[in-house]
Image: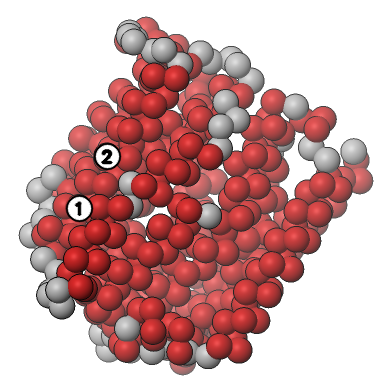
């Protein structure tokens, strides 16, 4: 809850100090960088968690691999990214070292959070990640208290640098806890041969999932500025980020379900998963009901007057938020059973529907059309998983 709250607060504060137009451009650049994080990681954190949970890879080997891959991949992809014109236009002229800070930090966070999860330590990574947001929170709060305009370069450096700081702290804590003081190149090679065999399928699944969640950003940009303004995109991105709050509780369950299912497949109790899904659904429907009754006031109060289009956009996306929160639990369950192919198939189905309906609905409904397209795709993904979960339960 602390981590989710910190991320939400960062989104609100950046929106307040930058406004709908500038924050939309800023988070659009962050979205592009996040895609590079996914590609550069090759989803190797999935293999790290899987084989560490099974104790087929030592903490020393896993840590050696994580540090080496994170720093080398971040450096290479940062250089590659700088060659793409306009890729980080939302960062202004603060693109010298910010890509490396963001990429290396996120890779370290992903790898070492996975190592802690594999050891069934779920609270510490969340706490460290939450605290890592404090530099951005302090800077934006200072700007607001003094009624000043945020310096984009400083904001970018603090925002991206906070990720590297968080990643280094997590790595340091893992090294200290596991008494790791040295590692060798042979440890990296041993780990890669094992981890890569599992991770390539998870990589495909994560690519499909990322496109499912973020393709609408790029499609909306195609209609800008003639049919969708930059401010509209800023409104939409904040609604999409708000939906991430609905995933917090499911992600907590998912981080627990995956290592337990991976290490003890027989312990995958279908009835227990059904109870989790039921409780998550009731909770999220209640939240949506409260926000629906509250109207647009809370959105404008939190984000500012130029975010007046968030309310109706959220209503169009709310059914999808409820659906995808349940998908998160199912996806972790199937991944723990080494049935990642089901997650890939479901994400590809949702991605196809979302892409289709984005092009059909955005010209008529603008950002509300993109939100409705997401709801259609996420609902289809949920029905797909329910069908296969029931088949698996019938064979248990």
Residue 166 to residue 176: above or below: below
Q: Does 87 sit left or right of 199 as displayed? A: left
Which residue occupies 30% across, 53% down? 134
The dot on residue 381 is none
Q: Name which residue lies at 16% across and 52% down.
A: 157
Q: Which mark is residue 165?
A: 2
Element marked by disc 2:
helix
State the count of labels: 2
Name the residue rendered at 33%, 33% in the picture: 169
- How many residues crowd around disc 2 within 10 Å: few (fewer than 14), some, or many (20 or more)? many
Rendering coords of residue 176 (x, y %): 39, 19
Closer to the camera in the image, 290 or 373: 290
Give the residue pinned by disc 1.
158
Q: Which percent across, then down, holds residue 220?
A: 37, 76
Answer with mark 2 or mark 1, whichever residue precedes in sequence: 1
Q: Is residue 189 visible?
A: no
Where does residue 348 sit, x and y in percent of width and height? 57, 56
State whether residue 210 appears in this view: yes
Looking at the rendered structure, the secondary structure element under dot 1 is helix
């Amino acid at each position: 809850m602390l981590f989710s709250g910190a991320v939400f607060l960062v989104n609100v504060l950046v929106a307040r100090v930058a406004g709908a137009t500038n924050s939309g451009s800023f988070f659009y650049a962050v979205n592009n960088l996040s895609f590079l994080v996914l590609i550069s990681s090759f989803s190797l954190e999935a293999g790290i968690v899987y084989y560490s949970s099974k104790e087929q890879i030592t903490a020393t080997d896993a840590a050696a691999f994580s540090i080496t891959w994170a720093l080398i991949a971040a450096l290479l992809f940062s250089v590659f990214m700088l060659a793409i014109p306009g890729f980080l236009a939302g960062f202004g002229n603060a693109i010298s070292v910010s890509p490396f800070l963001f990429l290396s930090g996120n890779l370290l966070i992903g790898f070492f959070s996975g190592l802690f999860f594999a050891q069934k330590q779920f609270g510490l990574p969340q706490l460290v990640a939450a605290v890592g947001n404090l530099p951005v929170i302090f800077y934006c709060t200072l700007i607001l208290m003094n009624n000043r305009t945020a310096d984009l370069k400083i904001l970018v450096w603090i925002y991206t640098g906070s990720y590297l700081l968080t990643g280094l702290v997590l790595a340091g804590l893992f090294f200290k806890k596991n008494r790791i003081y040295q590692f060798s190149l042979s440890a990296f090679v041993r780990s890669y041969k094992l981890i890569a065999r599992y991770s390539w399928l998870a990589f495909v699944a994560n690519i499909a999932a990322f496109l499912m969640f973020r393709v609408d950003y790029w499609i909306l940009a195609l209609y800008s500025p003639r049919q969708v303004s930059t401010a509209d995109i800023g409104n939409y991105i904040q609604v999409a980020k708000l939906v991430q709050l609905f995933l917090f509780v499911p992600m907590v369950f998912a981080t627990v379900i995956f290592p337990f299912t991976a290490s003890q497949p027989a312990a995958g109790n279908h009835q227990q998963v059904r109870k989790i899904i039921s409780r998550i659904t009731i909770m999220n429907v209640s939240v949506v009901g409260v926000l629906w009754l509250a109207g647009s006031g809370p959105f404008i109060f939190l984000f500012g007057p130029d975010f007046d289009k968030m309310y109706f956009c959220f209503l169009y996306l709310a059914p999808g938020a409820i659906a995808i929160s349940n998908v998160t639990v199912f996806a972790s369950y199937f991944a723990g059973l080494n049935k990642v192919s089901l997650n890939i198939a479901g994400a590809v189905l949702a991605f196809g529907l979302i892409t289709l309906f984005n092009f059909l609905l955005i010209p008529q409904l603008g950002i509300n059309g993109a939100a409705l397209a997401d709801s259609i795709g996420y609902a289809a993904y949920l029905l797909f998983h329910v069908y296969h979960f029931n088949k698996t339960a019938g064979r248990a």
